[in-house]
Amino acid sequence: MGTKTTVASVFRPLLSVVFAATPPPVRFEFWDGSSLAPRDGRVVGSVVVRSKDALGHLVWAPGELGLVRAFVSGELDFTGDLFTVLRSLQQSTPHDAALGAEAAAKALSVAARVGALRRRPEPPEQEAHPHGRLHSKRRDSEAITHHYDVGNEFYELVLGESMTYSCARFVSPSDDGRQPPDASMALVDAQAAKHDLICRKLGLDRGPGMRLLDVGCGWGSMAIHAATHYDARVVGITISSAQADLARKRVAAAGVSDQVEIRLQDYRDLGGEQFDAISSVGMFEHVGGERTAQYFDTLRSLLGPGGRLLNHAISSPGGSRISARSFIGRYVFPDGELLDVGVTGAAMQQAGFELRDVEALREHYALTLRAWVANLQSDWDRAVDLVGVGRARVWLLYMTASALGFEDGGIGIHQVLGVVPDDTGAARMPASRRGWM
């Protein structure tokens, strides 16, 4: 660049192409101190380009992956409320603009002028590259370890005292079923409300001593709730050793070690046991479409007549296999897959379940994620000490973007309740939702 040419002036043609339709109310700040701001002066925050390596990441890995690499490495940053800034950028960017031929040509031109093509920036170390056959036991274990074994202390910081890594239910005791989610509800209470609803949907309130299998038990919160509030006998399984270790300690601290068993076990190794009910909360996203029939067949084999299964999972209209070149696939949930809730329901029926209820909790997950982001941001320095700044930035971006996805309906979450009919076809279920509400 010439001595009088600013980085902002070099970037202006590229941003004019990317945001051709509707310029966002966002300022773009560059490493030489120059900036570009909306002409109307309305600004909700800034995109801070800290070095030419930010553009280098985008050129060498066009699209979402390059942008995320720049953010995780700290070469790209945001000021202002992250939710508002990301939403503004999303609303101002046509789906294909960042990947269009004209934008790509402009990006290359800008990269050349600022010297971003002279070397290829190294990808952040937080990326996952699982090996082996998709959804084999070994590869699934590797993927789960990448996401869940980053440190129990970090998850305690993010999730709060409930230590529950799934959608909460923000409904006050006086709710009549017609009110929007109660955003004023404390996260720990909202998680307890979710656990309690699942217990009642599964019929654990019919009497003490019922046997529950919790698949993907996490740190044991669902198992502890079922044991302490419904006197259930629970087996919780996980393939995360870090989760299993802490779950056992939490079970002991809750005084229910005689009722709850935590196993380090893959669902594919289940068999030869019988349960009254099964909860699968936040687990199904890791199963994969090709294994769905095996998953539900396995769970069905563990239930007798009248046995119930509740599958609580993120869903995507039409289904979505998470790409290995996407942010979520490379940094967060490698090999994850979101099924259409209709496909999930059909698979449960094919396995022999009668569907009794489907409930959407999309707005509740948005609130849950916002609470987790608030926890992370309020104790940011400690989070960085625990897992490093790169990993902390991954979780910040992933949870913020996910909240926006749930808010705009791009992704959903559903509880699907199935029951095993007896030989006469009777389901042994309440006649309506009043039976568990």
Image: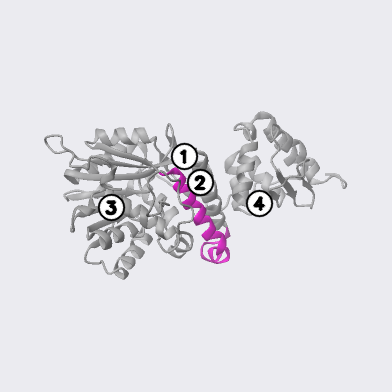
Residue occupied by mark 4: 78
| Upstream in sequence: badge 4 or badge 3 | 4
What secondary structure is the stretch in magenta mostly built from? helix
* Circle 3: residue type: Cys
Q: Secondary structure at mark 2?
A: helix
Q: Residue at label 1?
A: 411
Which residue bears the numbered disc 2? Answer: 402
Q: Which residues are magenta?
A: 361-389
For this orientation, the residue located farthest to the left is 423
Name the side, left or right, on which 154 lies relative to 10.
left
Of marks 1 and 3, the one in the foreground:
3
Q: Which sits earlier in the primary sequence, circle 2 or circle 1?
A: 2
Residue nearest the viewer, comparing 114 with 5: 5
| Residues at circles 2 and 4 in contact by the CB criterion of under 8 Å | no
Q: Amino acid at mark 1?
A: Ile
The span from disc 3 to disc 2 (Cα, nearest Å) is: 27 Å
